[in-house]
């Protein structure tokens, strides 16, 4: 199909509505955000997180779920469900029987390791390469492999990825979107290539961090659900007027009919086992040799053991802050409050101290990768700042309403 035809097809698709909103930078309307900002009475997250739900007492559904998972879920029964699932997929002929999408980070490495050593499965970890590895990310990736886990690594065309990262930055306000395409689709293709019908993910972020309440009892998302939950309703086909199908093949969905015929299933380990990120870190440090951020903490937060793999991680969280008023420290503190590791007062102090920190450590590398100047970068960032949430105070921007 000619580029002109692709453009016409896109204009006639559902994507056109999002495209118009993207160009207008009406963030609140684009993401259907509430007009009035409210913060959860239990944690530190606000109602500006897409799809999050607050109850009549002002408590977010992530906090409500965290309480229920400690008091109402029968985890022994859930583990028996897990055993039954694994037994249906278990193989004794030497072939892999479960795919674990993994960067070598604490959560995915934990999932792969317990599947092999606790449950006797033969997992294959599938890694979609970071845009630019950090030294600690590469170290932990190899530590995971050295611990006795098999791996297949997918790395996209560098020239294509650089162009796509820049376009996603400019048009979606999400410099990580190119990576997200591969992160969620590559493991499904690996499953098909190895004739494996079970993919085991980590947690269901919709319930652990706040999102669509209807997903609480889902064992896993179906192949195809990524459009709503991970792709901002902007699939790879959105870029077909600027890339060829060959260039986007590595980012594109697998054959849906083949996925259905092979009965490929994606499940959340967090549905079957109590999900506590800090405990995952301790497990991986002891069993795999996982190491935290050597800087002592990551930019934009106080934590030291999550999202360490890619030099662009901090930019993903920073643009989240610009659009939703929710940064990396908010995300970390909210979860640790729910897990009982922080009080709300401690969480508020950490958010106010670190959340608005601008990423600078890898800024030079990020600019070079995208082929933009620092002036252009700040112009793009400013265009994605949600004016409903931010106001100019003195010479800098500040949230109109901060967590207290």
Image: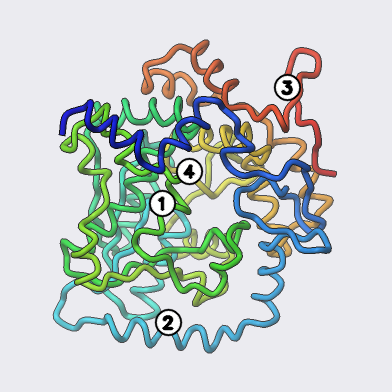
Please name whichever residue, 98 or 208, is drawn nearer the observer in this view of the structure.
208
Residue 82's disc number: 2
Is 105 located above or below residue 321 in the figure? below
**Left or right, 40 with reference to 236:** right
Q: Earlier in the sequence, mark 2 or mark 3?
A: 2
Mark 1 element type: helix
Q: Earlier in the sequence, mark 4 or mark 1?
A: 1
Mark 2 element type: helix
Is label 1 or label 2 in front?
A: 1
Q: Tell me the distance, in whole angstroms, between the alpha carbons under discs 4 and 1.
A: 25 Å
**Left or right, 71 with reference to 114:** right
Is label 2 or label 4 in front?
A: 2
Q: Are marks 4 and 1 in contact (CB under 8 Å)?
A: no
Q: Earlier in the sequence, mark 2 or mark 4?
A: 2
- Identity of the residue drawn at 76% across and 19% down: 392
User: What colour-coding does the image apply?
Assistant: rainbow
Is 200 located above or below residue 157 in the figure? below
**Left or right, 181 with reference to 60:** left
Q: Which residue is mark 4?
A: 308
Q: Which residue is mark 1?
A: 227
Q: Is residue 24 visible?
A: yes
Which quadrant of the figure contains the N terminus? top left
Can you give x and y, in whole percent of width and height, for residue 345 in the image?
84, 51
Can you give x and y, in whole percent of width and height, for residue 380 in the image?
52, 20
Is label 1 or label 3 in front?
A: 1
Q: Residue furthest front?
A: 12
Is label 4 or label 3 in front?
A: 3
Please name whichever residue, 153 or 392, is drawn nearer the observer in this view of the structure.
392
Q: Earlier in the sequence, mark 1 or mark 3?
A: 1
Can you give x and y, in whole percent of width and height, for residue 150 in the image?
25, 61
Mark 4 element type: loop
Q: Which residue is mark 3?
A: 397
């Amino acid at each position: 199909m000619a580029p002109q035809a692709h453009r016409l097809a896109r204009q006639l698709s559902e994507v056109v509505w999002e495209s118009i909103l993207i160009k207008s930078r009406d963030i609140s309307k684009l993401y259907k955000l509430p007009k009035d900002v409210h913060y959860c009475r239990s944690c530190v997250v606000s109602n500006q997180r897409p799809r999050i739900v607050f109850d009549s007492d002002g408590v977010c559904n992530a906090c409500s779920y965290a309480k229920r998972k400690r008091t109402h879920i029968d985890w022994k029964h859930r583990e028996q469900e897990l055993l039954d699932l694994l037994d249906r997929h278990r193989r004794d002929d030497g072939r892999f029987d479960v795919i674990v999408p993994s960067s070598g980070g604490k959560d995915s490495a934990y999932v792969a390791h317990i599947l092999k050593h606790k449950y006797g499965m033969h997992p294959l970890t599938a890694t979609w390469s970071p845009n630019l590895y950090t030294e600690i990310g590469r170290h932990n990736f190899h530590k995971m492999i050295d611990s006795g886990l098999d791996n297949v690594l997918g790395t996209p065309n560098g020239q294509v990825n650089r162009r796509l990262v820049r376009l996603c930055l400019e048009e979606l306000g999400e410099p990580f979107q190119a990576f997200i395409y591969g992160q969620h689709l590559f493991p499904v293709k690996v499953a098909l290539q190895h004739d494996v019908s079970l993919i085991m993910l980590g947690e269901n972020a919709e319930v652990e961090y706040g999102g669509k309440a209807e997903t609480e009892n889902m064992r896993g998302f179906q192949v195809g659900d990524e459009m709503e939950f991970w792709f901002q309703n902007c699939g790879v086909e959105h870029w077909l007027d600027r890339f060829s199908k060959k260039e986007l093949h590595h980012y594109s969905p697998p054959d849906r009919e083949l996925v259905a015929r092979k009965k490929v299933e994606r499940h959340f380990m967090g549905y079957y086992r109590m999900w506590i990120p800090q405990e995952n870190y301790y497990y991986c440090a002891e069993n795999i040799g996982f190491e935290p951020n050597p800087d002592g903490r990551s930019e934009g937060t106080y934590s030291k053991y999550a999202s360490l793999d890619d030099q662009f991680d901090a930019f993903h969280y920073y643009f989240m802050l610009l659009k939703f008023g929710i940064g990396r420290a908010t995300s970390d503190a909210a979860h640790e409050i729910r897990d009982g590791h922080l009080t709300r007062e401690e969480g508020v102090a950490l958010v106010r101290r670190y959340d608005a920190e601008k990423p600078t450590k890898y800024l030079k590398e990020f600019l070079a990768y995208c082929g933009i100047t620092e002036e252009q970068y700040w112009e793009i960032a400013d265009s994605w700042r949600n004016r409903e949430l931010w106001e100019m105070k003195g010479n800098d921007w500040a949230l109109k309403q901060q967590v207290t």
